[in-house]
Amino acid sequence: MRTIDKLLPFLSALFLLSFAINGCGSDDDDVSQAPRDFVVVTASDGAATIPDLPTGRPGDLSLLEPEERAVVEAADARAPEIRQTTVEMWIDDADGDVEIFQTRHGLTFGFPIELNRFREPGDLEWFTARMSEHFSLAVLESDAKWARVEPMPGERDFSRADADVDWAEENGFAIKGHTLLWGIPMPLSGAALPQWAEERWPSTNLTDAEKEDLRATLKAFIQDSVRHFRGRLSYWDVTNESLQPLAQWFNVRLGPTIINDAFAWAREVDPDVKLIFNEWIVEVFTGFDAPTGADVRDRVLELLDQGAPIDVVGQQAHFAPTASFVDPTQDISGRTRIDDYAAALDALAETGLPIHLTETNFIAPDDPELRAAQAEALMRLWWGHPSVEMIVFWGPWNKVAGRDEFDVGFWDEERNVTRHGEAVFSLLNDRWRTHVTATPRSDGRFEIDAFYGDYVAQWTVDGEPRHARFTVSPDDPVAGFALRSQP
């Protein structure tokens, strides 16, 4: 017998053993083996809690002009590339379908917090639940402003802001401080400037010694504030309305370089927190001649050229006439045209910095249907703009909103969803929130079209529920996610 004939039984046995160990296909085709380049996510026992969110009713964009609708449609066309992706998934074991629900958006949505506004039993609990369902960032509304922190010279009291931060951390929100330098005097604001500061430096023509005294006082307040919250805050509004005509208290006493100083002082204490140049523009807050979006762009570029460590352009988004904030009986039937505003937004983007929409209120126009259309158009414009990274709604619940006289909330005082709230929720909770039920193929694979954000997947194994959490992010792209039912 030839040698090869003697080896055939041995070779056949070796092949069968190899087949049994490795299978006839690749690892990627074997439902017991997760794909090598997928991120493995191990399940927890039990079912996930899927909130019952209001999906609302869209605004009627036919109420807007054709040129405005064209701007919105262009933003809609850009949005998929900016806000979503296709995600490969694999699961090792499931009785059938897999339900996948997006728990948080990748684009940051925020709201202000000031705990002292909550005075009736149950209000804070209800508010906490609603904010947790919809938003991911809490902003210190007024409790970190100079007049609140230092009501008497040299006597700083962070207790109110500390309580707000504690609450935000306990409920899983990122936090932004607001604001370190806001030069608007009383009675236009009771929180921006302490009364003692206005009395101590009343003149716009200070001596060199007085200027140095004011600068030293400001530096101490700014750096003590940043130091106090270092490691707990993700963002600080360093300046607020430094170009706004009514908010020039610091500029007229110390000159425009005080803005450079404020950013430098904050960065010196906390190199990690994001520093924001926050400003209004007349294309939104109508009634003044300046600053325009182009004015803000030019000023930010100037400051950057001078070395100011600005990380973000914050654009106040109070859509209302300026006069209405002084006298709420003023006519608010008019509104900002979406196409005019879109040009201003593009001007801000020319700074090359991310844009945060801050203090967003849909105030004008007062007609509920037109206000809803305005809100929807603006939201879709922001969603489809590559520079927009954050939208902060300034008072989602009217009962604790700072401008409740305008019915700014998405919920009214009785917790009912308002008409413009419906328009916003139709976007946040329906159009832009992924919620799908997928059927894995025989190899355990499936794919979903997903908006960026946080997710929970749930399924059953032998009738027992399992769930797992994962995040889809443009900053950390992965080949896919492997859902393991057991460790």
Image (cartoon, rainbow, N blue to C red):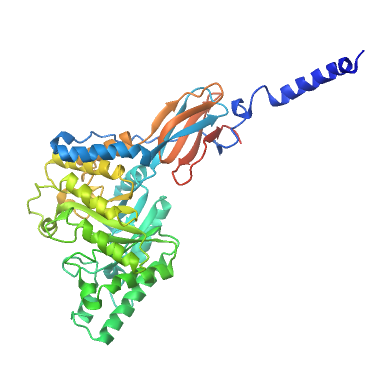
Let me know if residue 315 appears in the view: yes
Q: From this viewpoint, which residue is outermost toward the top?
A: 1
- Taking 19 as reference, is 142 left or right? left
Residue sitting nearer the eye, 296 or 111: 296
Image location of residue 221, percent across then percent down:
34, 73
- When asked about the image quadrant of residue 435, the answer is top left
- When asked about the image quadrant of residue 79, the answer is top left
Q: From this viewpoint, which residue is outermost toward the front?
A: 2
Residue sitting nearer the eye, 260 or 169: 260
Considering only vertical position in the picture, is 181 above or below 438? below
- Taking 92 as reference, is 139 left or right? left
Considering only vertical position in the picture, is 141 above or below 14? below
How many numbered discs? 0
Let me know if residue 416 appears in the view: no
Q: Quadrant of the N terminus?
A: top right
Image location of residue 288, percent across then percent down:
12, 60
The residue under the point 77% across, 22% down is 17
Image location of residue 202, percent across then percent down:
18, 80
The residue under the point 17% across, 56% down is 282
Residue sitting nearer the eye, 130 or 307: 307
- When asked about the image quadrant of residue 165, the answer is bottom left
Image location of residue 298, percent across then percent down:
26, 62
- Taking 310 as reference, is 46 left or right? right
The residue under the point 63% across, 29% down is 27
Q: Quadrant of the C terminus?
A: top right
